[in-house]
Amino acid sequence: MFGHWGKILQQLQQSEDEFRKIVVSAESGGGAIQLFMNGLQELVEIRFGPVAPFLLVQERLGGLIGEAFNEALRHSRRLLKEEVSRLTGGINLPEIPGLF
């Protein structure tokens, strides 16, 4: 039994580069903020739309960044969980804090 799990863990470790290539995006404020996150839940890029400076003055920019970040994180975790399920042959892994 442990040999099977050892093989799965090895596959997951080898797939780290593939997870890094998975990129999701999320936006908030009608495109004022757009965040890009990879499959390892690393923030890759932040883009600010033309209205972002006005939102900074109104002290709303921070909240919009948080909303976009949380949406990108949820999307990234969902894709990562699907990829791990594919690699493990459909084994439904439990929720792993910090992973998905």
Image: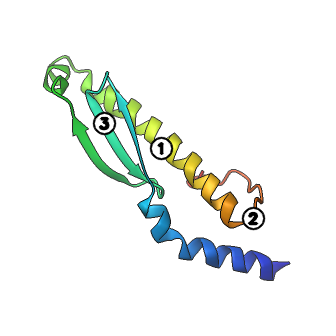
- The residue under label 1 is which amino acid type? Leu
Q: Where is residue 67 shown, x and y percent of the image?
A: 40, 30
Q: Is residue 68 above or below residue 53?
A: below
Front of the two marks 1 and 2: 2
Earlier in the chain: of badge 1 and badge 2, it is: 1
Earlier in the chain: of badge 3 and badge 1, it is: 3
Q: Quadrant of residue 26?
A: top left
Q: Which residue is mark 2?
A: 89
Q: Where is residue 22 shown, x and y percent of the image?
A: 45, 56
User: What residue do we see at 26% from left, 43% from top?
Assistant: 46
Q: Which residue is mark 1?
A: 73
Label 3, label 2: how far apart the Cα atoms are:
34 Å
Front of the two marks 3 and 1: 3
Circles 3 and 1 in contact, beta carbons < 8 Å: no
Q: How many marks?
A: 3
Q: Where is residue 82 shown, x and y percent of the image?
A: 63, 53
Determine the residue located farthest toward the bottom in the rendered image.
3
Circles 3 and 2 in contact, beta carbons < 8 Å: no
Mark 3 neighbour density, 10 Å: few (under 14) some (14–19) many (20 or more): many
Q: Which residue is mark 3?
A: 34
Front of the two marks 3 and 2: 2
